[in-house]
Image: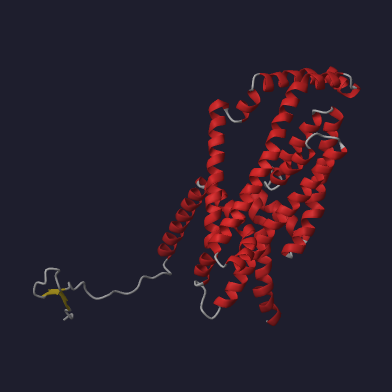
Amino acid sequence: MARIKRVFKKSSDKSPEIPTKLEDFGAKGDPLNIQHPFYFGFLATTGALVAFALLQALQSATQVFILIIISLFLAMGLNPAVSALEQRVAKRGLAVTAVVILVLLFVVLAALVVIPPVFSQVNDLVDGAPQLIDSLRNNKTFLTLDEDYGLIKTLEDKFENWFTDGALITGAFGGVLGVGRTVLSGAFSALTVLILTLYFLYSLPSVTKVFYRLAPASRRERVSKIGDAIIARVGSFVGSQILIAFFASIFVFFLGLVLDLPYAAALGMLILFVALIPLVGHFIGGTIVSLVALTQSPTKGVLALVLYTLYVQIENYLITPRIMKRTLAIPGLVTIVAALLGTSLLGLVGGILAVPIAAAILLIMDEVVFPKTDNS
């Protein structure tokens, strides 16, 4: 006869204790046979469906993840400055506020320097388009191309369609409503990145401590040190990207001086921000520099495009691998391969994550995998 337990409950109105009986649900049966093919097939199918649903959810939230990753990288890049200032003011909140305000002031000043020349150059390009086309008619090479393919006539029609009718902007953003939607979306994304960066900067130490507590107590100290080293390498990667963009801005500044381009300093400042954009940053920068040079003469426009393209190749295969090897201890070949694979697999997100992930993997291999294999 099964044992019957008595549980005594006490009501909130201080009524007498009333004994209640728990139902007897019978004896426990044998555990399920997890080796049975049906059980394994059911679990495998359920796991596949859950994984597929999760991938679909992640795909639909790609834009959100991009903003989170950008904010996290900005936070890790600014974290060394915040940590250094925190040692002086002894409060992380004040250090975060000071660093963010300085960065925002720099961005605003750069925008004030860059935006007026950009609009001025666009106006110069629109006003000087007829003279540029007339100068192309005096060039023998372009004249031959015009006779064979109607190149100059095509350029005239495009300039009239884009700039006179305003089709360039409205077409690029999907009409007038598309322009407004793009502006609002960009402003909302910038505000979201700013807020997330503030949160990440302020709570980075406490968040990492929570994750480190998931490790066993006997290994927590080592896990914490490796985790801090990985975060430091990600921060080094952000700093390296800023340094590479700075070199690109210096190159564009001197290119503007050599070609006698107007607003050379503003062009260099613009490239400093544009070059930070993965995948398409240098494409945008090369287009802007070439258009500015084209307002002066077709020869300068072609020369600026060729020299900028040459610099991008030098940066990709010489400057970037050397800087990454010095700051992240990554071989140049690994940097190039990781960037190519990350971009091919995940696009913008892959281009951002590829090199820091490679640095983290190499660190784990040096500290965990290789010691085990050397002692085995």
Name, please, the residue furthest toward the right: 140
Measured from the top left, where is residue 223 in percent x and y? 58, 73
Q: Is residue 259 left or right of residue 4?
A: right
Q: Is residue 146 above or below residue 271?
A: above
Q: Is residue 359 left or right of residue 69?
A: right
Measured from the top left, where is residue 225 in percent x and y? 61, 73
Measured from the top left, where is residue 155 in percent x and y? 76, 21
The structure's colour scheme is secondary structure
Question: Can you tell which quarter of the image residue 99 is in?
Answer: bottom right
The answer to whether one can see residue 132 in this image is yes
Front-most of 202 and 374?
Answer: 202
The answer to whether one can see residue 150 in this image is no
Front-most of 97 and 239?
Answer: 97
- Quarter of the image with the N terminus is bottom left
Measured from the top left, where is residue 209 in percent x and y? 52, 69
Identified at 63% across, 52% down, the residue is 102
Q: Is residue 286 above or below residue 93?
A: above
Name, please, the residue furthest toward the left: 16
Front-most of 152 and 91?
Answer: 91
Figure disc tally: 0
- Quarter of the image with the C terminus is bottom right
Question: Can you tell which quarter of the image residue 165 is in?
Answer: top right
Q: Is residue 209 above or below residue 139?
A: below
Front-most of 150 and 25?
Answer: 150
